[in-house]
Image: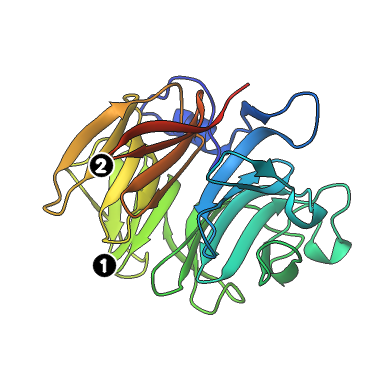
Amino acid sequence: MKRSFLLATTTLTALAAIATGCTATPLGDPDSAPRIDHIHGIAADPRGDDLFVATHNGIFTLSPGGDLSGPIGGHNFDAMGFTVSEDALFASGHPGENTPAELGDPNLGIIRSDDYGNSWSPIALNGTTDFHVLTAGPDGVLYGIASSQVNLLTSDDEGNTWSERAPLGAVDLAATDSGVYAAAEEGLLFSADGGNTFTSVDAAAVLYALEARTDGTLVGAGTDGVLWAENDSGAWQKLESLRGAVQALTAIDDRIILVDERGIIEISTDGTNILAPAL
């Protein structure tokens, strides 16, 4: 996910700017590698407690102790879209200086790693499509929003083929067992038919970053500068005020991890903890 540190409004133009901008929240040692300037996505490493941090110059790992390393495998492509499904990593974006030509140029399409980012293979739409949003549902279905079109795209065969669904002016997606949610100009939308049709979720704030917890409840960053969370009954509550716009957001059990002007932040029942501070 891509965020711009401008106060968001409820216009589609502003939401799109938040979703697609490469925005600086520098992390790491300014005097030695690695250093991260633009963060697009963040996800749990299924092998343990590390986090994957998808950036403008590759995918990095962040340990629970705050150690940042990477880019993994030396791959310095711009990971505009990124998601983890089971043990597979899926990414999209643009090639870096050392990206193999087979992965696609000027757009990566869909690429896949089965060794946690050490190597990547071209899967689909390589060279033609740049997905700015990628997310995986609990059933393995992939959902994406490409920069070149307005229709939601879905894949039920691990990214090999993609189908167009409803036109969707959305900047983020989250998938649960019950369906797929979209953060859009008009507010939170929900589809129970694989993305063919959407209806409004009236109880939610206007959100521009969205993530589903394991239990199917949602968390999101609102255009009002607030981090919101949904409870089991579908009611929404304010968790805390944000510092600038959120670049990336994920939920791991009862932990919420996001990237804003403070750096990489963990929010849980134990309070707020800075995992990697901004420079």
Residue furthest front as drawn: 65
Q: Note whether residue 148 is visible.
A: no
Percent position of residue 169, x then y: 43, 46
Kind of element beneath mark 1? loop
Q: Quadrant of residue 180?
A: bottom left
Percent position of residue 207, x then y: 34, 37
Name the amino acid, label 1: Ser
Who is closer to the viewer here, 142 or 117? 117
Who is closer to the viewer here, 23 or 151? 23
The answer to whether the residues at label 1 and label 2 have Cβ atoms under 8 Å apart is no
Who is closer to the viewer here, 56 or 16? 56
Q: Is residue 227 left or right of residue 172?
A: left
Percent position of residue 193, x then y: 30, 70
Q: Is residue 69 left or right of residue 208?
A: right
Q: Note whether residue 21 is visible.
A: yes
The image's mark for residue 229 is 2
Instruction: Please name the residue shown 61% across and 29% down the image.
Output: 23
Sequence-first tag of 1 and 2: 1
